[in-house]
Image (cartoon, grey):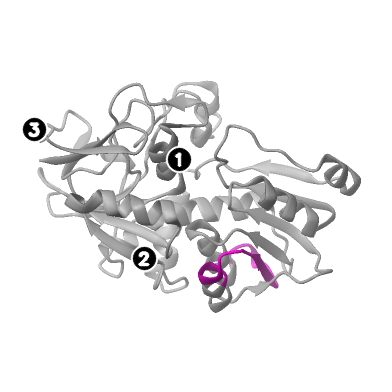
Amino acid sequence: MTVARLHAPADLRLHDEATPLARDGHALLRITSVGLCGSDRHWFEAGGIGGTTLDEPLVLGHEFAGVIATGPDAGQRVVAEPAIPCRVCTTCRDGRTELCPTAGFAGYGGTDGALRTYATWPAELLSGIPDTIGDDEATLLEPLGIALHAIDLAAVAPGARVAVVGAGPIGQLVIRALQAGVGGAGEVLVEEPLPHRSDAAQAAGARPVRLGDEADVAIECAGENAAVDAAIDVVRPGGRVVLVGIPDQDHTTVTASVARRKGLTLQWCRRMRPSDLGRAIALVDRGALTLDGLVSHTFALADVGSAFSVLMAREGHKVVVRP
């Protein structure tokens, strides 16, 4: 099978490797589509993320869909939960498996991801997808799960005004979920400097932040300090800011005087909760939320270098590789 491995920053190589064997509790998947994420961009650019560095060649890709290749469920189309929690630590026993400190994660650390023809994955972390959701769109279900978790963490009250800062794929999905009624928000605002992303956010129903606007909550999806400050600036006193974006460096800074004066709550969002993938599938399947137009570029695995070039340039919206 063909595998794309990252050997060093910007050093992505194709290899011919043996097809893996599925051990007990795992399924062999023929990978159909892999969405590239901002965290993949960090790995490609810096050879690490959040203090975790590249110790050996790594297969990236954690937003993936595939078809079960063997066994009684052969032919079933599935999407994967990319985090593999330990399920025995205190955090997992408390039901917060997304925060498991020893969890494996596809395309992170020592756990290979999905930029390859075949992969094995724990069967319990696979969810069937209906025919109403295409293979490329299925790669957006995990980011949609994160968007749903972020809205939950924002504690959006019915009718609340929500500002979304950063309209990359996750920001776009936050906007679409809010417009679909998740959280019961009222008006949705957006702040995004890239014109094509701002235009897409407005097409989804958000309006640009204007001077003097005040939001009840803000969801920051850019991973840049300027975006964090923008979120803090737009939120009313006593409001809440949810930080979803992953910074390039392992530090986030804020203008402390503004955050203190407003008495803000800063809430970090990590990944999604166990139920969020199923929620995402159900929202799309019943037509409450559409994923149309979010996949802007598709590439074959043989052209994965071009896919990362588009990702690094932040062109379009979601970049998908089809192994």
- The structure residue drawn at horizontal position 46% and vertical position 70%, both measured from the top left corner, is 289
Task: Pick the residue in front: 289 or 48.
Answer: 48
**CA–CA distance in space, label 3 to label 1:** 28 Å
Secondary element under disc 3, as helix, strand or loop, is loop
Residue 299, image x and y in percent? 24, 58
Asked whether, in this view, residue 11 is left or right of residue 45, the answer is: left
Say which label, 3 or 2, has the lower sequence index: 3
Say which label, 3 or 1, has the lower sequence index: 3
How many numbered markers are drawn?
A: 3
Say which label, 1 or 2, has the lower sequence index: 1
- The structure residue drawn at horizontal position 51% and vertical position 57%, both measured from the top left corner, is 170
Q: Name the residue under label 3.
A: 18
Task: Pick the residue in front: 70 or 261.
Answer: 261
Kind of residue at badge 2 = Val
Which range of residues does the magenta coloring cover? 182-198
Q: Does the magenta stretch include residue 12?
A: no
**CA–CA distance in space, label 1 to label 2:** 20 Å
Q: Mark 1 points at which residue?
A: 42
**From where the camera sits, is residue 165 visible?**
yes
Residue 296, image x and y in percent? 36, 67
User: Do labels 3 and 1 touch, CB within 8 Å?
Assistant: no
Residue extending furthest right?
Answer: 261
Secondary element under disc 1, as helix, strand or loop, is helix
Kind of residue at badge 3 = Ala
The circle on residue 295 is 2
Q: In front: mark 3 or mark 1?
A: 1
